[in-house]
Amino acid sequence: MEAGPGDVITVNPGEVHDGAPIGDEGRFWQMLYFDPDVIAEAVADIRQGRPGEFEFADPVLRQLPQAATMRQLFTAMTAGQAGAELRRQELLLTLLAEVMREVPTPEPLPRGIRAARERIDDDPTKAVSLADLADLAGVSQFRLLRAFDKAIGFTPHAYLIQRRVQLARKLIAGGTGLAEAALASGFADQSHMTRIFTRSFGLSPHLYAVSMRPAQASSGPC
């Protein structure tokens, strides 16, 4: 996707984005990371409890009323004003009602692919080989590689790295130091984590940690 000044980029859980600029010009952006459970709870409220799977409909909001609402939400969530919970909740519900769409229920994963994915999900910090995953799935390594990519949207290795970087982000958001977060999430060292983290989220772990400090100090929920 491509976005310009004033646009709002939306990213669904599991999607990869790199934040790389087009050309030689620099870029600056403001970010909000929501726990998927917060979004799920808000969408359930909007739908009055009716079940369904939802995602952001458009990857880029271009100078639309929804983009203006997003900027207001950012201000409300980062200004640190006492008693602003009601305003934040109103803006979040208003925005989600306009930009979320229902997605079809996905086909169940083949049993072997599900077993391989669960092996990674159970402990993404643990090393695993393609042969190990293929044995779990009961297929050849090549067949697993192709089938996993088709079903999940990532190769097994790319999926493992995404699970590790998501774990690292969670640890950093909770106040864990960068070196400790790198080792605890399965990376070889802090430098390795930094490269993957920056490529995945568009900012370094250090900048992400700095950006999370106001949220860590805040006493009120969003």
Image (spheres, rainbow, N blue to C red):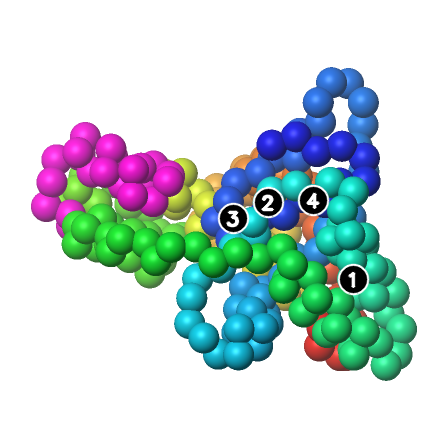
Q: What residue type is labelled 1?
A: Leu
Dots 4, 1 in contact, CB < 8 A: no
Quarter holding residue 170: bottom right
- For mark 1, does the 10 Å Cα neighbourhood hold few (<14), some (14 to 19), or many (20 or more) residues? many
Q: What residue type is labelled 3?
A: Val
Magenta stretch in the rendered image: 136-156
The prevailing secondary structure element of the residues shown in magenta is helix
> Is the residue under label 2 in contact with that under label 4 (CB below 8 Å)?
yes
Q: Mark 4 points at which residue?
A: 61
**Neighbourhood count class around disc 4 (C-alpha, 10 Å): few under 14, some 14–19, many 20 upward:** some
Q: Is residue 21 above or below residue 73?
A: above
Residue at 43%, 55% (x, y): give it: 103
Residue holding disc 2:
58
221 to 184, vertically: above or below: below
Q: Is mark 3 on a helix, strand or loop?
A: helix
Q: Which of 17 and 101 is in front in this view?
A: 101
Q: Which residue is at a point 88% across and 79% down the rendered structure image?
A: 82
